[in-house]
Amino acid sequence: MRTTRIAIVGAGLAGLYAAFLLEKSGIRDYLLLEARDRLGGRIESASASGTSPETVDHFDLGPTWFWPGFQHRLGCLVEELGLERFAQFETGDMLMERSPDEPPTRLQGFANSPPSMRLIGGMGALADALHRRLDTARILTGQRVHHLRATASHIELDSEDASGRTMIQRAERVLLAVPPRLAEDSITFSPSLPRALARQWRGTPTWMAPHAKYIALYDDQPFWREQGLSGEARSALGPLGEIHDASVPGGHAALFGFLGVPAQTRKSVPDDQLRLHCRVQMARLFGPRAATPAVDFIKDWAQDSCTATVADRQPTAQHAAAPDATATTGPWHERLTGIASEWSPRFPGYLAGAIEAADLGVQALPEFRK
């Protein structure tokens, strides 16, 4: 049984950033456990094939944008890590599909203010940059935490790998960097969480969990721009309900969209068939060249067991109000704190929310209050 001062459950952006803050403060007695065999959590990238690792383009299957104009802490972190950012392309008209009996309508596009920003290398560049600043000996992947036990002196964490082998860790405090609903659904707490707290966590929708994204990469230039189009579209026909330009400056042309088909329906459609329907829609909107991407991808977050619960597969409002992050009394008080994005007071569900919630959780540790 390994004993550590602080255990972080989940190596998405919140977990990685919490470990980064601990390292910066000279606290290196921590352990970061991640159920997946990769880091980043809901940050995940698709890569363009046929290029070297040094020049490969990355496209976000999870979160894509951030807004440093008002998400200052995340903007400062991007600068501190030396990452390059660029504005989402929004120049030109957008398209609207309202009926199968009429062609798409061309409308004046609009631009976000402040602008939506993306990262060179995709959001995976942010996770990778944080990872490079951590002690890799403190990170365990492929360990799904399924039981937390509060004893008189420690919290014991039971985790299981893909082969079913169990490991037990002990920590003085636990930072929970997995979504509240997923934590309440997949982790057994002994003793149980306070009823009101468990109810809050269970009732908090997991950001991205009901959704699926489609990305189409093209070898030529963003040809829709030649038509004065921004690459943005809305559709009542689908299967994509919302589409945006996903091109990389100096790299591949790309379009991405959110599937408007409910999660339960998507589950019954083979992946290759769903991608075919998406390509047909792209051709309806942007012309025949859009029907033949060099490669395309679908990421269905509703089928990702490290993200979605059964309740998350129902279409509900995202970015709901943040639940309480910790118990106010009892054995879990000041020993277990939620730090995933959904616990952010100002930006629940967003990348900036993961940064804010992790910062609040780390700053609340007794080590930081001395």
Image (cartoon, rainbow, N blue to C red):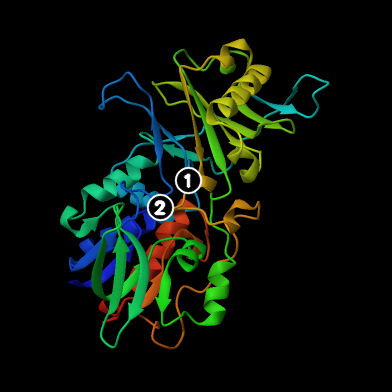
* Residue 342 location (% of width, % of height): 50, 61
- Choose top left, top right, bottom left or bottom right for residue 43: top left
* Residue 306 location (% of width, % of height): 43, 53
- What is the crowding at mark 2: few (fewer than 14 residues within 10 Å), some, or many (at least 20)? many
For mark 2, give the secondary structure. Answer: helix
As drawn, 40 above or below 109: below
- Residue 41, disc: none
Question: Is residue 81 at least partly visible in the picture?
Answer: no
Earlier residue among tags 2 and 1: 1
- What is the crowding at mark 1: few (fewer than 14 residues within 10 Å), some, or many (at least 20)? many
Left or right: residue 322 compared with residue 121: right
Disc 2 residue type? Leu
* Residue 97 location (% of width, % of height): 74, 27
* Residue 197 location (% of width, % of height): 53, 77
Residue, x 35% and y 37% (percent of image)? 84
Task: Using the image as rendered, state which of residue 212 and residue 111 is in the foreground.
Answer: 212
Circles 2 and 1, Cβ within 8 Å, touching? The answer is yes
As drawn, 49 above or below 340: above
Left or right: residue 273 compared with residue 67: right
- Residue 66, disc: 1
Residue, x 32% and y 18% (percent of image)? 50
- Residue 74, disc: 2
Q: Residue at the far right: name it.
A: 101
Residue, x 58% and y 40% (percent of image)? 267
- Choose top left, top right, bottom left or bottom right for residue 223: top right
For mark 1, give the secondary structure. Answer: loop
Task: Using the image as rendered, state which of residue 333 and residue 302 is in the foreground.
Answer: 302
Disc 1 residue type? Phe
Question: Is residue 210 at least partly visible in the picture?
Answer: yes
As drawn, 267 above or below 197: above
